[in-house]
Image: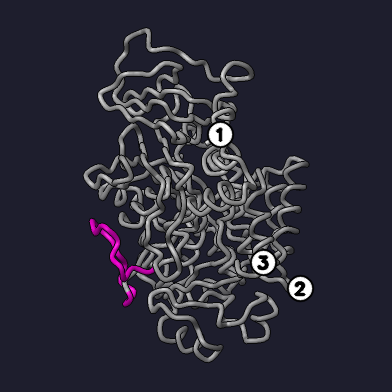
Amino acid sequence: MNSALRNSVFGTALFVTLTTAANGQTYDLVINNGRVIDPETGFDAIAHVGIVDGEIVEIAQSQLEGEEVIDASGLIVAPGFIDLHSHSVVDLPANRLQAFDGVTTALELESGVLPIADWYASVEAEGRATNFGATASWSFARIATMVPEMPPVEPTAAWYQGAFNYPRWTTNVTTEEELDKIVDLIQQGLDDGALGIGVNSGYVPGVGGKELLRIWELAAENGVPVSTHMRNWSEADPLSSLEGLAMVLGLSATSGARTNICHLHSTNLHDTLKAADMVDKARSIGIDVHTEVYPYGIASMPIASAVLLQAGEAFRARMGIDFDSVRLIAKGRWIEDEADMRAEQDADPGQFIIMRYLDEEDATDADILRKVTALPWIAIASDSIPYTQPDGTPITGQEWPMPDNAFSNPRSAGTYGKFLREWVREDELLDWPEAIAKVSLIPAQLFDGQVPAMERKGRLQEGMDADITVFDPETIGDRATIDRPFETTEGIEYLIVNGTAVISGGEMDTNVLPGQPIRK
């Protein structure tokens, strides 16, 4: 660790006031001797953190005393990582894997759920290692409105996956009556505390622009962000991803709604850097648009998603890959050809797959991924998905550790470890403060002025929530792979959620579930 760097910033240009332990106060929890980094103020120094009742109450130059004391010598003390794109927050075992990746707040923003009140109640009753929250789901509302064959809407992944047996909701334009009902269902979700609206339009090629404008206007009226998986998903014109991006930027500009574009690289493929330039220019002229990426070139989705239903040549032209770039998650094998794909779609249209759209072994693809992930204004998010057994049965409840036959996407367990290992320690594309901003402050800023609870997160300052990730910069790194996606990230030495240690000395305490719901 560079001691000159970590000690150089005491004194000038700091907005954090360092106090001493002269008042003799004893704290619930103290973190002494760590390199404390707060990306909002620029504070970066060896300091000592005092916590009382789940709040950071002191950052001091002198060591503090507390009921519990962590010696963070040689470690970085950072604001807890905030994942804006976590589908795995629905299950406790997967949520614990995210905690091992440094996450203290996991949010289901892209897809969202309905009914929101039922979702919060069920998750809160079971408990979570991290804080949690969700958007009101446009997709769930569309399914509930347009698919009478479906049972009443439930806030579960199984209910959503079952809807792919009835593709009308993905292919048809809504009637005025249907759109009114969709809006009513989303509004109920917002009234029940949803953090915004999740618009998964990448899976709904039949949606029209008028419907999307209505949804963006609804978000603006309620003062909440829209998180969206863009429509089109193609390198080929017409209906390319860049055209879909232009539409999203236009919706944001004309409605006034804040917009979060999910996994910018996943939806723009080999046009990713052009897409990033478009977003950057939109931000420069005042359009309130944000985005996030994950440090992998592999996507996950149900096998009956519209993009995977395209005929061979159309699929290859639009996606820039072939069918053998698709892997069946639960069965642990790669698709052989188009005929194999169609057979699996017929047999189980809701099963999840991995699709490699940027090959990290290819120099050109790797360069795209490196450059977009390092852009300083883009958040890091995992797009984690739930874990299943080989037969597709979800791994839920109190099961821990994750079994060796668990399947998912490796980013569900390794996103933040891989980002910090590869982009910071190994390649030095970013320094530690820059990287920490991308996993804490920048995600939190999506909600500035709209969700007060999030304004107390992503910052390591007096008066902020005691959500803190303490990691070893020399060892932080992912271990999850496509074949073993359940392997925990190493180097997370301590994880503090609302003042309670979930991980201590690299070991998880399964007796504590301090995560709290975050609502609008």
Using the rendered view, name the quadrant where residue 390 is placed.
bottom left
Magenta span: predominant SS is loop
Could you say where residue 82 lies in the image, as x and y percent from the top left? 48, 44
Q: Earlier in the sequence, mark 3 or mark 2?
A: 2
**Disc 2: CA contacts within 10 A as few (<14), some (14-19) or many (>=20):** few
Could you say where residue 208 lies in the image, as x and y percent from the top left? 65, 66
Q: Secondary structure at mark 1?
A: loop
**Disc 3: CA contacts within 10 A as few (<14), some (14-19) or many (>=20):** some
Q: Find out whether the residues at labels 3 and 1 contact each other: C-beta distance under 8 Å.
A: no
On the question of residue 295 being in view, the answer is yes
Q: Earlier in the sequence, mark 3 or mark 1?
A: 1
Q: Find out whether the residues at labels 3 and 2 contact each other: C-beta distance under 8 Å.
A: no
At horizontal 35% and vertical 18% (from top left) the residue drawn is: 64
Q: Is residue 134 magenta?
A: no
Vertical placement of residue 391 versus 71, above or below: below
Could you say where residue 153 lies in the image, as x and y percent from the top left? 38, 63
In the image: residue 250, left or right of residue 19? right
Q: Which residue is mark 2?
A: 237
Q: CA distance from mark 3 to mark 1?
A: 32 Å
- The residue type indicated by label 2 comes to Asp
At horizontal 44% and vertical 20% (from top left) the residue drawn is: 59
Q: Which residue is mark 1?
A: 2
Tag on residue 409? none
The magenta segment:
390-407
Camera-side residue of 192 and 428? 428
Q: Find out whether the residues at labels 1 and 2 contact each other: C-beta distance under 8 Å.
A: no
In the image: residue 278, left or right of residue 309? right
Q: Is residue 402 magenta?
A: yes
Q: Earlier in the sequence, mark 1 or mark 2?
A: 1
Camera-side residue of 127 and 208? 127
